[in-house]
Amino acid sequence: SPVPPLPYVAYPNPRQPSGAAVTVDSSRSSVGGRETAAAQKRSRWIRRGVLALLVLAWVLIGLLVFCVGERWSFISALYVITQIVTTVGYGDLLPVRPGMRTFMLVYVTTGIVIVAGIVTAVCDALVQKAEGAFASRLMNHRRRQGRKRSSAGVKIRYAILADFLFFAAMILVGVVVFGAFGHCVCTVDGQTIPNCDESTCSRLGVHRGFVESFYMSVITLTTVGFGDVVPIGDWERGIAVVWMLVGCASAGNFVGAVARWFANEERRFRRREPLTSDLIAEMDKNQDNSVTRYEFVSFILQRRGLVSNYELQAIEKQYARLDKNRE
């Protein structure tokens, strides 16, 4: 509804006139006083090095325990570790020796809380870099066709397309590798065929087709991991280690791109939202029948989902540390 006459008056903050500057105390600033840019960069590399060593130690501990305690091969142990990191959890290789379930309880918890986030972030960064390059090529092709400058919505749609194509490519890799070149399987509808193993599978087992491979690829990369169709043998499991890491990251990026599109549509809707008397009254945080520029801008930014109240409070605290005169 149109905005009726209101008792509110919009004016700059009286404590700080428009165009006035504040005196910054550099001793309160981490940039000017206590820490230089070089020190920040060095600290950042130290943290990355510690995280890398942490991931390496976690993987080596798992390989040692699984190879010695469960007598798994190196590839099978790495395959199980990858299932833990990606949370696929087929359940085709399980701890059976005494004490291994207790170790697995601690190992999985540590991996999910600490290591999985680090490994997933690295894989996401690599996948996003490749998908971003592809999306940029799509945008450049659009410009070469003489189309007008793209909006944020168009860029997000191109990003969704790039993420979807990368995810579909990883599914296709699974279909080709595990369907055309894969081994036969010893399970049918989750039931193990009697007397069937890697040595007798060609005679007693069922050869995995493209439909089963497509099913396994989708179930795996979406981290559902039913475990009824799984990679068989060290050859398939070795490929699955890399395939699951990259494929699960691509699936997550695709879902994230779709979520960003919905969020962008919500922001577009809020941008068209008219300013009513109720909204203006909500802007007036200190209830003084006036709306300052800061109140208006901060309210609109929060309303459109561009910044949270927590982030605004953190910015205000940082400004307070820089303000020498406490204005």
Image: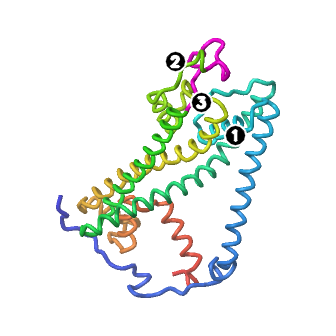
The crowding category of the residue bearing disc 1, from other C-alpha atoms within 10 Å (few below 14, some 14 to 19, many at least 20), is: many
Most foreground residue, 286 or 210: 210
Residue with the most extreme top position: 194
Tag count: 3
Judged by its main secondary structure, the magenta piece is: loop
Q: Which residue is mark 1?
A: 78
Q: Which residues are magenta?
A: 182-201
Left or right for 322, reference 265: right
The magenta stretch spans residue 58: no
Up-down relation of residue 26 to residue 253 (above or below): below
Most foreground residue, 27 or 255: 255
Mark 1 vs 3, N-terminal side: 1
Q: Position of residue 326 (x, y in %)?
A: 55, 80
Cα–Cα gap, marks 2 and 3: 14 Å
Q: Which residue is mark 2?
A: 189
- In the picture, the disc for residue 155 is none
The residue under the point 35% across, 69% down is: 296
Location of residue 122 (image quadrant): bottom right
Q: Position of residue 322 (x, y in %)?
A: 57, 79
Element assignment for label 1: helix
Element assignment for label 2: loop
Q: Which residue is mark 3?
A: 90
Mark 2 vs 3, N-terminal side: 3
User: What's the residue type where badge 1 is placed?
Assistant: Leu
Cα–Cα gap, marks 1 and 3: 14 Å
